[in-house]
Image (cartoon, grey):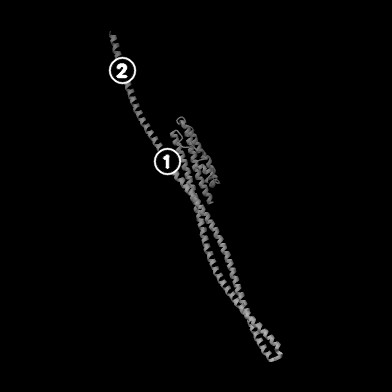
Amino acid sequence: MEVFKIVDIFSRKKRKQRKQETHAQLSLVDKAEDEYKKKLVAKEGEIEILKRKVALLENENQNLKQGLGTVQSNLSDSVGNNNEALNQLDQIDSSFDSIRSESKDIVQQIYSLKKNVDETSRFSQEIEEGAQFILEAIGNISEIAMQSKLLSFNASVEAARAGEAGKGFSVVAQEVQRLSTSTSELLDTIEQRTSSFNEIANTLKQSSSSTLKTTEKMIKQIDRFDSVIDETTVKNKDSLAKVYATNDEVFMSLAKLDHILWKVNTYISILSCKETFSFVDHHNCRLGKWYYQGEGKKNFSHLSSFRLLEQSHERVHSGTKQIFKYLTDTDANIDLIAQGAMEMEKASEEVFKTLDLILQEKKLSKEN
C-alpha cells in the first residue's frame, strides 16, 4: 500500500508538472500569437501606408502628366507661332533683297541719266560756242557788207560824174548795193535766229546743270538709303538666324518633353496594368515626323550627328512596345517589364544627348 501511495503521489506531481509545463507552453504560444498579431497589425498598417503612397504617386503621376501636357501644348503652340513668324521674316528678308536689287537698278538708271545730262550739257556748250562763232562770223560778214555798200555808193557817184560812159558801171554799182542790202537783211535774220539758239543753248545748259546737281543729290540719297537697306538686311538676316536657332532649341525641348510624357504614360500603364495611351512607332510620333519628313530632315540631315538619332529613338518605342506585351499579367512578367523600362530609359537618355549634339554641331557649322 505504501508503494501505491508513493506511486500515486509521484503521478500527481508528474501530472501537475506536466500541467504547469503545458500551461507555460500555452502562455508562450499566446504570447507569440499576440506578438504575431501585433506584427500583423503593424504590417497591415505599413501595407495601408504603402497603398496610400502608391495612390499618391499614381495621383501625382496623373497631375504630372496633365502639367507636362499643358507645357507640351504651350511649347507646341510656341513652335507653331515661331514658324509663322519665321515665314513672315523670310518674306521680309525677300522684300529687303528685292528692294535692295531695285535700289541698285534705280542707281544705275540715275547714273545713266547723269551721263545723258553730262552729254546734253556738253552739247549745249558746243551749241553755245557754235552760235557764238556764227555771231562773230555774221559780224565780220556784216562789216564786209557795209564796206560793199560804201564802195557801191562811191561807184555810183563816180558813174554819175562819168556821164554816158559810166552808165554800165552805174548798173553794176546798183546791183552791188542791192546785194549788200540783201546780205545785211539776211545777216540780221540769221543773227536773230542765232541769238535765239544761243539763249536756248544757255537755258539748256543751266537746266542740265540743275538736273545734274539734282541727280548727284539723288545718287547720294539713294546711296545712303542703299547703305541703310544693306545694314538692315544684315541685321534682319542675323535676327532671322537667331530666331531659327531659338526655334530649333524650343523644338528640341518639346521633343524631350514628348519623351518624358511618353515615359510617364508608360509607367502609368504599368501601374494600371493596361495601355493608357495609343502606341505609335518612331516614324509617326512628333519627333519621327520631324526627322523623316519635316524641318529636321530639311535643316539637319546634312549633319553627321543627325543620323545617330534614328536608332536610339526607335529603341525608346520598342522598349514601350515590349512593356505593353506583358501588361495583362504584370506580376508574373515584372522582370521582362523592368527590362523593357530599362531599355526605354537608356535609349531616351541617348535621344536627349543626340538632340543636344545636333544643336551643337549646327551651331559650330554656322560659326565656321
**Residue 51 at x, y percent in the picture:** 38, 33
Asked which quadrant contains residue 198, the reply is bottom right
**Residue 67 at x, y percent in the picture:** 42, 42
Q: Nearer the viewer, residue 97 or 128?
A: 128
**Residue 236 at x, y percent in the picture:** 50, 55
Residue drawn at 50 percent across, 44 percent down: 355
Give the SS element for disc 1. helix
> How many numbered marks have been drawn onto this rendered protein structure?
2
Asked which quadrant contains residue 30, the reply is top left
Please name the residue that numbered disc 1 is placed on: 66
Q: Report whether 69 appears left or right of 199.
A: left
The correct choice, above or below, for 148 with respect to 42 in the image is: below
Disc 2 to disc 1: CB gap under 8 Å: no
Numbered circle sitting on residue 126: none
Mark 1, Cα crowd under 10 Å, few <14 / some 14-19 / many 20+, is: few
Please name the residue that numbered disc 2 is placed on: 19
Sequence order check: which comes first, mark 2 or mark 1?
A: 2
Badge 2 amino acid: Lys
- Residue that lies at the very extreme toward the right in this rendered image: 165
| Real-space CA distance between mark 2 and mark 1, rounded to the nearest whole angstrom | 69 Å
**Quadrant location of the N terminus in the rendered image:** top left
- Residue that lies at the very extreme toward the top in this rendered image: 1
The correct choice, above or below, for 72 with respect to 231 in the image is: above
Give the SS element for disc 2. helix
Residue drawn at 59 percent across, 67 percent down: 116
Badge 1 amino acid: Gln
Q: Is residue 44 visible?
A: yes
Q: Report whether 1 appears left or right of 267.
A: left
Instruction: Please identify, in this view, whether the residue under mark 2 or under mark 1 is nearer the observer.
Output: 1
